Image (cartoon, coloured by chain):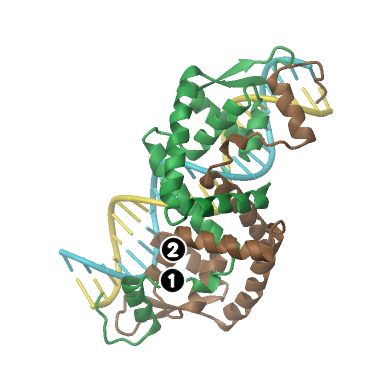
Chain colours: A brown, B green, C cyan, D yellow
DNA sequence: TATTGTTATACTCTATAACTATA
DNA sequence: TATAGTTATAGAGTATAACAATA
């Protein structure tokens, strides 16, 4: 860590990283995709850490919220809403159901499909999780003002909706 | 797809999805993390598709850009800049090197480490890739104006830097 | 024959531990 | 002993094909 007499770029980049954390990636600064990925990674990791206390993954939290908003929806609908494939929805739901947070109810008219619902425990937990997620958001975006957060959400929604 | 006489929420959500694409996830609308993830996914997939023509993944493109900006850097530096673990940097570099885009040069003072550089071919390809990435960005964020794109990048940089 | 959910499988991404060769 | 790079491995996440039950 003390190769002070070497004038090579390698040594220089090492020293800079140590001192000023000068970005090695500024040549990618004008790419939205790159900035999006880095920011998403940070916010996501923050949430993963918070949800770990509940032994939940972000996708499971999202699933709970979507089920709450669409009680009785089918697995195929859930998969589409989560942007995952049906087989993934199966294992995700299995976990939620085994933990007593959600349940599958056989459909009357079409016995192939289920209606998916939250249990009372699932609803209660979801309320907590919403607060946790909001707090996680705040922390991960502490550098932004309330106005800027609203601006950001508006811009992001324009992209994917 | 034609269960018209069923008044269950499941059927309703199905129909809505088909007709107005009304979001099943609007209860997550005020979470930055969620919006960030959905937007990132879309922009990322766009880029993945574009880079497929070059048989490259986004991380490989990013690596090329970082190497170009920091010629002679060490693998550990590259790994940190890419936010990946050193073992991942090995396989990534192996691929780039086997394709003649980058090269490892043994360090004079410390024979354990390498200096990493782009080949001439790597530099040439990188120029093309920058254009491809910029175009991919534009397409994926077609709903935004030029001003809004600049706004967005500024906000994202505030989050992760 | 088509569809819902499921199983099995494979491929990628990511993280960790252990090894080598140098220092 | 400590460090740079590497190997091996295991765990998620993701996608596809094939199957069972029902329509």
Count residues near mark 1 (Cα–Cα under 10 Å), then give few for <14, some for 14-19, many for 20+.
some
Give percent across and percent down for residue B1.
Answer: 26, 74
Q: Is residue B136 left or right of residue B91?
A: left
Percent of width and height locating residue A45: 64, 54
- At horizontal 50% and vertical 34% (from top left) the residue drawn is B61
The label shown at residue B58 is none
Q: Looking at the image, is A87 positioned above or below residue A108?
A: above
Among the 4 quarters of the image, the one containing residue D4: top right
The quadrant the C terminus of chain A occupies is bottom left
Q: Chain of mark 2?
A: A
Residue placed under numbered mark 2 in the picture: A161
Q: Residue at x 62, y 54 (%)?
A: B155
Could you tell me which quadrant the N terminus of chain A lies in? Answer: top right
Is the Cβ of the residue at disc 2 closer than 8 Å to that at disc 1?
yes
Q: Foreground: A24 or B86?
A: A24
Q: CA distance from mark 2 to mark 1?
A: 9 Å
Determine the chain carrying the residue at label 1: B
Q: Secondary structure at mark 2?
A: loop
Q: Which residue is mark 1?
A: B23
Question: Which residue is depicted at the point 35% across and 73% down?
Answer: B20
Is B128 above or below relative to A100? above
Name the front one of labels 2 and 1. Answer: 2
């Amino acid at each position: 860590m003390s190769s002070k007499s070497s004038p090579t770029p390698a040594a220089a980049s090492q020293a800079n990283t140590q001192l000023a954390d000068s970005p090695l990636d500024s040549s990618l600064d004008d790419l939205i995709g790159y900035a999006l990925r880095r920011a998403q990674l940070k916010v996501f990791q923050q949430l993963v850490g918070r949800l770990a206390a509940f032994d939940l993954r972000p996708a499971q939290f999202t699933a709970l919220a979507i089920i709450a908003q669409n009680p009785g929806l089918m697995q195929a609908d859930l998969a589409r809403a989560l942007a995952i494939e049906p087989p993934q929805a199966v294992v995700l739901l299995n976990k939620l159901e085994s933990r007593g947070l959600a349940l599958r109810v056989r459909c009357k008219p079409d016995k192939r499909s289920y209606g998916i619902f939250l249990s009372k425990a699932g609803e209660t937990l979801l309320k907590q999780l919403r607060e946790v997620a909001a707090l996680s958001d705040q922390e991960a975006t502490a550098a932004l003002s309330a106005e800027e957060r609203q601006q950001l959400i508006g811009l992001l929604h324009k992209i994917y909706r």
